[in-house]
Image (cartoon, coloured by chain):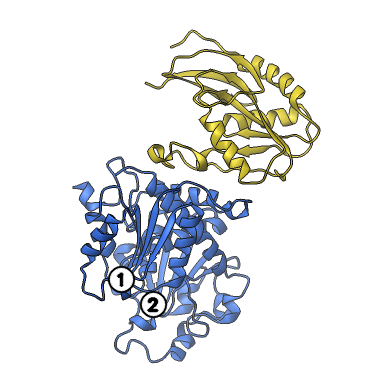
Amino acid sequence: MLASRHPQLNKHGELIHLLTLEGLPRDVIHHILDTASTFLSVHEREVKKVPLLRGKSVFNLFFENSTRTRTTFEIAAKRLSADVINLDIARSSTAKGETLLDTIANLSAMHADMFVVRHGESGAPFLIAQHCAPHVHVVNAGDGRHAHPTQGLLDMYTIRHYKKDFSGLTVAIIGDIVHSRVARSDIHALSILGVPEIRGVGPKTLVPGDLAPMGVHVYHDLADGIRDADVIIMLRLQNERMTGAMLPSAGEYFKTFGLKPEKLQLAKPDCIVMHPGPINRGVEIDSAVADGTHSVILPQVTFGIAVRMAVMSIIAGNEP
Amino acid sequence: MSTLLLDAEALYVELRAGVRRLLQPDTAMVGIWSGGAWLAERLQHDLQRPGAHGVISSTLHRDDFGSRGLAGGADATSLPFDVEGRPILLIDDVLYTGRTVRAVINELFDFGRPASVMLAVLVDRGGRELPIEPAFAAARVSLPRGQRLALAKEGDRFTFSIQDTR
């Protein structure tokens, strides 16, 4: 039963796919973060490549567009010496009516070793992991509203890099939590790593009411939610996922929930401001904050490549 | 258990003398993680070499990645000097199959083209699977395949232990 509940772990408890951070042992997360720190310096070498995935084929399957995430996975796979195949899947086979599992069977016949999957439907990477050949590894690059585990891991890497220890932290996640798979992955990871105070901050329409069982304290007032925070994770206002009138306007949102310098002063003096990108200046974050001294948004991008290298090399090295 | 006794401290004195003869003025010492790194650190100090020694890991170039993966953890290479054109002296505790040394040489060349690469070890236990020979070994011993010879560090002193791997 354990195997069916945790399809991402083999019988030794080692990671063979990365589908979600929910339920991952703390040791596994720290192992990924430790491994990422060794990869962080690879770009400083004369030869900016290591041969761990030499001869392996990594297929980027983005059923939903994301140039940035796809690019960071591509860079990560290439730094590990893998061959990377980018499929414009949204506009090819799916449009012709092929089912997801038929697409996967066809790509497996092309000797894929790893699928990096982004899909609009929650659970699609799980389905693929359950049906692909045993030697194939699957990385979830974001599925519906469910999970974005590599973003969650790179956020944890960033927090660990600047704060060293998770045990005394107050982390405020601010914005469109209801649509955010990043928020879900962050919340799971933060609680696994022992963060004592996790806050979800935003308007009632964008912060789900079921966060308390996940150990999250909900705030509908930005000033209250931000007070004494060590870490602020801003979320993008996901216009493309908004159906119906959840907000009066982007301008109204900025007025009440946009992160501005005067609001930031309520947080701890050494707090860090994170954002998964792409940022909407003047909607969820003020330029003075995005470009300010507390912002670690660009280091997050750099860490993201090292974290994705760590994930891909760890799962590729573990037997099914 | 084996009756073989190896006095790691006495062998270290031998190694120090051997390394002293191999060093040129601009040679950089690089210890192979983890036992070799301890040795290189102590040699760097005892031989009063300028600058810092390097530490090198075989992890990213190992030939058993497919079966072993990265489960053993990642240990970072740190070479606080320019590898390009430098004579390099690799230091390790135990030389066995030579596969770690092969991986480490690949790792080294990712940082530049050294002028030369040599190897000095505390113990050469034979059993080579690659054409790799040390320029200096403080001792040569023969051990059965199922036994592992490991350097341990207690404070500033080294000891050897022999473990059965089967």
User: Do we see residue A248 in this rendering?
Assistant: yes
* Badge 1: chain ID: A
As rendered, which of A240 and A166 lies closer to the eye? A240
Which circle marks residue A176 in the picture? 2
Which circle marks residue A230 in the picture? none
* Badge 2: chain ID: A
Residue at the extreme left: A1
Residue at the extreme right: B25
Task: Describe the element under mark 1 as helix, strand or loop.
Answer: loop
Q: Mark 1 points at which residue?
A: A144
Q: Position of residue A89 (x, y in %)?
A: 32, 70
The residues tagged by marks 2 and 1 sit, at their Cα atoms, a distance apart of 14 Å
Query: What is the number of callouts on the image?
Result: 2
Q: Position of residue A149 (x, y in %)?
A: 38, 61
Q: Residues within 10 Å of mark 2 (few under 14, many from 20)?
A: many
Residue at the extreme top: B3
Residue A316 versus residue B12 in the image, above or below? below
